[in-house]
Every structure is written in C-alpha cells, then in structure tokens.
Image: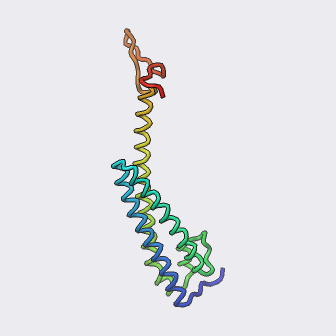
Amino acid sequence: MAAIDMTPVELQTLRQALEQETELAQRLYEVLAQEQQALEQMASEQIHELAKLKTQLLMQMDEKMAVRQKLMPNANPQNGLESFLEQAPEMVARVLRPVVEQFREWLYRCHRQNEVNGRIIAGSRRSVERSLNLLRGQNPDMVLYNAKGAARPMGAYHRHATA
C-alpha cells in the first residue's frame, strides 16, 4: 500500500469533515434520547417525527462519510479510520486522533441509546401481543380447572372477542 501523504490543507479539510460527522453523531444521539422519552410516553406523533429526523441525519452521515473517504488518500474504506491513522505519518495521526476518538465516542453513545430504544420497543410489542392474545383467548398461560381440580389449557375455544 502506498504511503499516506497529505498537504496541510488536505489535513485540515479531513479534520473538518470528521468534526462535521461528529456533530451529526451528537445530533443523532440527542434525537435518540428524545426518542426514548417519546417511546416511554407512547407519544406516537413525536415518535414518527423523530423517526423522520433520524433518517435525515443518517443520510447526512452517509454523505459526509463518502466525502471523508475521498479525502483519505490511499485508505481502504473497509479497514476504517483506525487503520488509516496507523498508516498515516505521526503528524497526521496526532492531528486527527482526538477528533476520531471523539467521533467514535459519539457513535458508541448512539449505539447504546439505540439498544435502549430497541428494548423499549420490544417490551411494548410484547405487551401489545399479550393484550391481543388475551382478547383472542389465546393466552398459553391461562388454564381452566375441572371439578376434580385437574388443570387443562384454556385454548382458543373460550374467546372473549372475535376479530
């Protein structure tokens, strides 16, 4: 692989691109935190608006990533920023490493917040499914007892409602 050689202007442009990506990651984290609150409050309109905003931010991040990759000479995009910094001259790595670490930290925060939101969504979904199953009389945990005290599953024959 060819050595990484950058002019001061190219280095500054790359640093600015990384800073812009970091700002987008910060904004995404803020939206994800707002989404958590909306999910907890079951505010469907706010959830919908935040989903649109998330999509816009992710598209902007993709665009910025494409710009950044063009600014990274001789870098293999599959190997990522860390590989680029390892191959870069010490001066380039020294300038970029703090920005890369900050960017990575915000991406990690986004990942963690997204996991929290995913757990909230999964819990809400399970709750809705349990409620629907109860209405349909399909709760596998429900049992009926006969005159002798023997338990048997309630089954689908004792429905409270029919869809």
Please identify the residue farthest to the top as the structure is shown.
147
| Image color mode | rainbow
Residue 114 in percent (x, y) is at 43, 57
Quadrant of the rendered image containing residue 87? bottom right
Residue 162 in percent (x, y) is at 47, 25
**In the rendered view, does 98 fall on the left or right side of 75?**
left
Residue 39 in the image: above or below residue 5? above
**In the rendered view, does 76 fall on the left or right side of 102?**
right
- Between 3 and 131, the one lying in front of the other is 131
Instruction: Write the residue at 39% across / 56% down.
Output: 35
Residue 142 in percent (x, y) is at 40, 24
Instruction: Write the residue at 37% across / 9% down.
Output: 147
Residue 78 in the image: above or below residue 97? above
Residue 16 in the image: above or below residue 139? below
Q: Quadrant of the N terminus?
A: bottom right
Instruction: Write the residue at 57% across / 80% down.
Output: 71
Instruction: Write the residue at 62% across / 84% down.
Output: 3
Please identify the residue farthest to the bottom as the structure is shown.
8
Callout count: 0
Residue 108 in percent (x, y) is at 44, 64
Please identify the residue farthest to the right as the structure is shown.
1
- Between 142 and 132, the one lying in front of the other is 132
Residue 108 in the image: above or below residue 137? below
